[in-house]
Amino acid sequence: MSRPKPSVPDALPVRDALGRSDVLQHLQRRLREAAELLSVARDVLPGELGAQVSSGTLDETGWTLLARSSAAAAKLRQCLPRIEEALARRGRQVNAIKVRVQSAYRP
């Protein structure tokens, strides 16, 4: 006896779905680029400051760095020239780098 045909078609693997969508491919490229920029930035940050920073939005207007605290944001702003120089040395250029304090998530 044959098995009944499922009423829901086989699911498309996520990787295939991502590969078929121009919008999702563009988003993936932006996320990869932001991760690469963050890696460069962390390489030139002093001490443990790199662990206090994450990447925010990367778009045509610029790149946003998120700091875990206002103190980390202040120090990060002081380091912006060093970050911009490191990015330029690696041929990476962004229009502007903004620093924001990352708000805490409270459910």
Image (cartoon, rainbow, N blue to C red):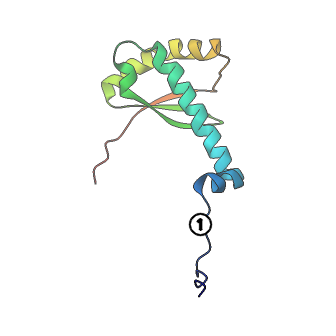
> Residue 83 placed where, x, y %?
52, 16
Residue at 47 percent across and 13 percent down: it is 44
Q: Quadrant of residue 87?
A: top right
Judging depth in this view, the residue of 36 and 104 nearest the camera is 36
Residue at 61 percent across and 51 percent down: it is 15
Quadrant of the image for the N terminus?
Answer: bottom right
Judging depth in this view, the residue of 66 and 74 nearest the camera is 66
> Residue 10 placed where, x, y %?
61, 69
> Residue 14 placed where, x, y %?
58, 55
Quadrant of the image for the C terminus?
Answer: bottom left
Q: Is residue 77 above or below residue 22?
A: above
Residue at 46 percent across and 20 percent down: it is 42
> Residue 86 placed where, x, y %?
57, 13
Say what secondary structure mark 1 lies in: loop
Give the class, few, some or many, for how many residues have Cα within 10 Å of label 1's Cα (few <14, many ≥20).
few
Q: In the image, what residue type sits under mark 1?
A: Ala
Question: Where does label 1 land, which residue?
Answer: 11
Q: Is residue 60 above or below residue 77?
A: below
Toward the front, the furthest residue is: 1
Please indicate whether residue 106 sits to the left or right of residue 26 in the image.
Answer: left
Tell me, yes or no, if residue 73 can be seen here. no
Q: Is residue 13 above or below residue 34?
A: below
Tell me, yes or no, if residue 74 can be seen here. yes
Please indicate whether residue 91 sits to the left or right of residue 51 in the image.
Answer: right
Residue at 62 percent across and 62 percent down: it is 12
Judging depth in this view, the residue of 4 and 37 nearest the camera is 4
